Amino acid sequence: MKLLKYILPLLVILTFTSCSDDDDNMESINEVVALMLVQEFTNETHIVELYTQSGDFTQGYNNITLRIRDKVSNQFIQNASITWTPMMHMTSRMHSCPNSDVIKVTERETIYTGYIIFQMPENSNEGWDLTINYMVDNLEYSVISDISVPMSDRQVVSVFMGADDVKYILALVGPESPEVAVNDMIVGLYKMESMMSFPLVEDFMIKLDPRMPSMSSHTSPNNEDLFYNDVSEMYNGKLSLTMTGYWKLNLMLYNANNELLKGEEVSGTIESSSLYLELEF
Amino acid sequence: MCRIFYSLFVLFFLSSILYAQEKQIDSTKVMDLDEVIVISRVGLNNYKQEKPLSFLDEYLEKSNKITTIKRGNYAWEPSMNNMLTDRLSVTIDGMQIFGACTDKMDPITSYMDVSNLSEVHVKSGQQGSENGSTIGGGIDLKLQKNSFGYDDWNIGVDIGYGSNGNSETISSEFNYSSEKYFVNIDGIHRKSENYFAGGNEEIMFSQFEKFNVSAIVGGKVSDEGSVIGSVIYDEASDVGYPALLMDVSLAKALISSISYEHKNVHNVIHKWESKLYHNTIRHVMDDTKRPDVPIHMDMPGWSDTYGFYTKMYAKKEKHTLLFNVNAYYNKSLAEMTMYPNDLNENSMFMLTWPDVRTLYSGVYGEDEIELKNRQKLKVSARFGYQNEYIASEFGLHSLRIFYRELEGKKNRILLNLSTQYENKINNFDFLLSAGYGERAPSVSEAYGFYLYNSFDNYDYIGNPYLDNEKSSEVNFNLNYSNHKFKAGVTTSFFFISNYIIGKIDPTLAQMTIGADGVRVYEALEYATIFNTGLSVSYNLLPAIDIEGGLSYNLGQDYSGMNLPLISPLDYRMSIRYRKNYFNASFNMNGAREQSNFSSDYGEDMTGAYAVFNANASYSLLFENNKLILKSGVENMFDTYYSTYADWNNIPRMGRNIFLNISFVIQ
């Protein structure tokens, strides 16, 4: 009995040490440390793991990291070329949404990244699925699964018809974690060409007017309107947030010829633009 | 022979010092740049203090130089030479202490009470730079402490009642002194309901309650050396500010110090005093009792100060010297949290003072030189170095919304100089002084973030790039006195360059719901403030004194626009009867209408007024014990009025009948 008193802790230590040894091995190739697993897609040969910051998909902009594990060798695939197709199955029709190419993260071994902008959330009759096609060593594979895209608490994506009779999708990409400061504001803007095609819209301009409805439409100073950036392929501007809370980001969209396509100036009785995004922190 | 001569000389000298001190308290001058307001009970008698338990603020108002800005019935803000907190140096026994309220609801004087103090030294302009940089002057609150001596003790109890607002005050103290030790312990409690303005109009949210306790203990460690420790705790709760949108649920201060005093260090240095101190203030604004606020908010603030000073008093031949080396470190932080009416929304939070750390160190020297024929020359200088930085990342990022490149660090050099010449010819005494002073912007002026000012209805943003404010001043005093009649005139003129004031920035939008816009602190090219006063007193009959006074002030910016909160022409008169143990006085004070008001800063014309007060007292002595009864009526005709110094024209108290009973057992 007395002996057990000494053996038991020893055993526990041994077990833990061995466990953490395993972890160390895993960690050397664990490139998703800061991320949370959303879902695993499985086919006969591979498991495709999808990660986001929050561990969920949500309506609006989703920055997604993924990696592919070989079911047999348990190794992560390092040389896959990947494409994806998100699809909304509505009661009457189907459509996709703006999304980026999936690319290998530079200077990383196992992870690939891209973004998807779900312009509408699921509901009880309608939902999203995601097809991932990938090629490893000239062999083609595919996984597909339903995914859950709940409605976001605030309006982080807007679908609207411009004055030019084009349907646009505008999504809030950044700031990811807003601060009481001058934030870098990033917005993605896409044209809905067809049910399946959502090309980038370049060289437009988006006027920004952030307001706090609960503070009698208080606005902040030194904001900067959003302009297209060739590198990020998004619209960048500056957003000043003078306090935490709920902010309504009133926007006005101008095309390359400086013609107003959507939105109104906030003044007098007009408390809000018809084109806006929301943010709360 | 030489020795006797020397002793006689010293004796003569000592007596002249003592005489001078006496004189200061019961001055032959009616106008002076330096004033001493006596509060202590040590000299308690029934004629020096008209209302023994009145607020410290009421004592301050007796100074010719001081008026107080009122936001309600509590925590009045002293104004000296028509300049407020930011331009004054207010200290407690040389200790630096800074309020924790972004809205100036807690001037330092609100954390002290009459029970703590023996006297207040009021020094105008650059004469007041002994303890810190200043423009308008210095107010040093002197703690009441015994001196070592014979075994002696006394207990005092004061009870006061005021009919208006049912105000009750009770104060008690115990003092003990012996050859080696002394102890002073006191406590005071005040409580008042809403007061009523003239015509029986109840002023809602004007109630208050506070208590203050303090202990000072001294012990001799050698024949010449003594250690003195002091602790003051002051707590006010449920204080209404009828002129503002918010009240205060808690304002508390803990003020402590330990000092070492050494006498006769050297044949030249007759006293050397060093003190280490700390004080911490917490101030909580609250509007939960207000019925109609657009949005509820909490606004707590903190101010902590650590510091030391070492002062040397020396005398050599015709020079009376004082040196003071001091340093302090202050931390000022204030936040605001607003609660949206939609409960699903996150609360709205901001830092209104971004945890500003100020480190100041400075040296001060003064020399009073006795010249021939009762002439005196006094020169003084202070040199200070100040380093300030924003310690909160959150706060720094907030201010970068306005100032993109803000580093959040700043070093300043602050200089104060003054010289004063005094001459006595027959019954005349005249004094001429000139000074130059600099001050750093206050925390609000440099780093404030959307501080709402209900006076002009603007939000204020600090400006971290502000330069020091610089003042050049000249003063002239002339006093005449003979046996029965005294008269004095005082004039001071301040030319203040880089005058710091809020200027409207039309590109900015207000944060406060209902405000008119945003002002950013800026430095005006210059502003001028001119103050003049006349004072007379006449001893009509042995028992009857008549006193009167008049003062006029004008403050303008470089373009000739009026500055806000400048007193209009005001006047006062009193007649006093004093015989044996009975004392009575009747007095009036009033002002002409404020025609030089500043509409830009939310002022309108305040009407003329005059109010009348009367009081009487009787003191009874039995054995060594003393009982003093004092009663009076303030604003006896129940006049409805407000003065230029009343925030948002909040009316002053109507008729108030007070009764004070003071009892001293010894």
Image (cartoon, helix red, strand yellow):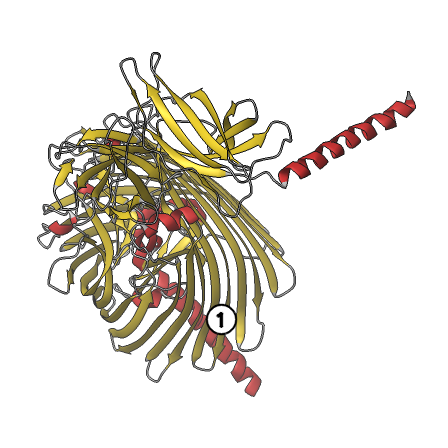
Considering depth in this image, is B160 or B401 the residue closer to the camera? B401
Which residue shows up at 14% across the image and 54% down it?
B568
**Quadrant in the picture for residue B499:** bottom left
Which residue shows up at 50% across the image and 70% down it?
B312
> In the image, is residue B35 above or below residue B651?
below
Q: How would you rate the neighbour count of disc 1 (Cα within 10 Å): few for under 14, some for 14-19, many for 20 or more?
A: some
**Would you name the residue on which mark 1 appears?**
B313
Q: With B191 as the anchor, is A112 left or right in this view?
A: right
| Residue B294 visible | no
| Residue B612 visible | yes
Say which chain tag 1 marks. Answer: B
Q: Where is residue B390 shown, x and y percent of the image?
A: 41, 54
> In the image, is residue B490 above or below residue B174?
below
Q: Where is residue B45 shown, x and y percent of the image?
A: 38, 49
Q: With B379 as the anchor, is B514 left or right in this view?
A: left
Q: At label 1, which amino acid type do we have?
A: Tyr
Q: With B310 as the anchor, is B337 left or right in this view?
A: left
> In the image, is residue B4 above or below residue B300?
below
**Quadrant in the picture for residue B286:** top left
Considering depth in this image, is B146 or B563 the residue closer to the camera? B563
